[in-house]
Amino acid sequence: MLPPRAPMSKELAAILAALLLLLFVTPMAGWWATGAIGWLMPYALWLLVILGALFIHRWDNSDGP
């Protein structure tokens, strides 16, 4: 029998939330929102958010055996 895993998903979700706040709420948003970076940057950042959430979901798959 395998030992129980530590609940890493809560810590990873907190880290992802902190990164979201850093990227989208702080003055750092002015950096990537400028036209000099390109129109694709907001979409790339949201793709990273989605991939991070997918990683957290896959990491803590409690539905499995």
Image (cartoon, rainbow, N blue to C red):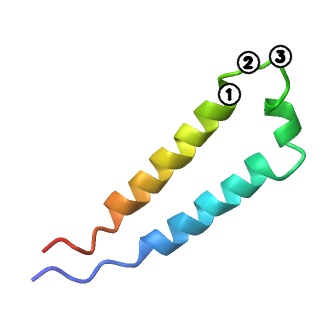
Instruction: Give the residue pinned by disc 2.
Output: 38
- Helix, strand or loop at mark 3: loop
The residues bearing labels 1 and 2 have C-alpha atoms spaced at a distance of 6 Å
Q: Nearest the camera: 43 or 28?
A: 43
What residue is pinned by disc 1? 41
Amino acid type of the residue that numbered disc 1 sits on in the rendered structure: Met
Tell me the amino acid under the disc marked 3: Ala
Q: Residues within 10 Å of mark 2 (few under 14, many from 20)?
A: few
Question: What residue does disc 3 label?
Answer: 36
For the N terminus, the image quarter is bottom left
| Quarter occupied by residue 62 | bottom left
Q: Tell me: 21 left or right of 16.
A: right
**Residue 56 in the image: x percent, y percent?**
42, 60
- State if disc 2 and disc 3 touch (CB < 8 Å): yes
Q: Of the residues under marks 3 and 1, which one precedes in the sequence?
A: 3
The part of the image, by quadrant, that contains residue 4 is bottom left
Marks 1 & 2, CB-CB < 8 Å contact: yes
Which of the pair 60/42 is nearer the observer?
42
Q: Is residue 26 left or right of residue 19?
A: right
Is 10 on the left or on the right of 29, as rendered? left
Type of amino acid under label 2: Gly
Badge 2 element: loop
Q: Residue at x 47, y 55 (%)?
A: 53
Q: What residue appears at the point 32 percent right and 58 percent down from the top-left corner?
A: 58
At 28% from the left and 68% from the top, the residue drawn is: 61
- Give how far across and how far down residue 15 sits, in percent: 61, 62
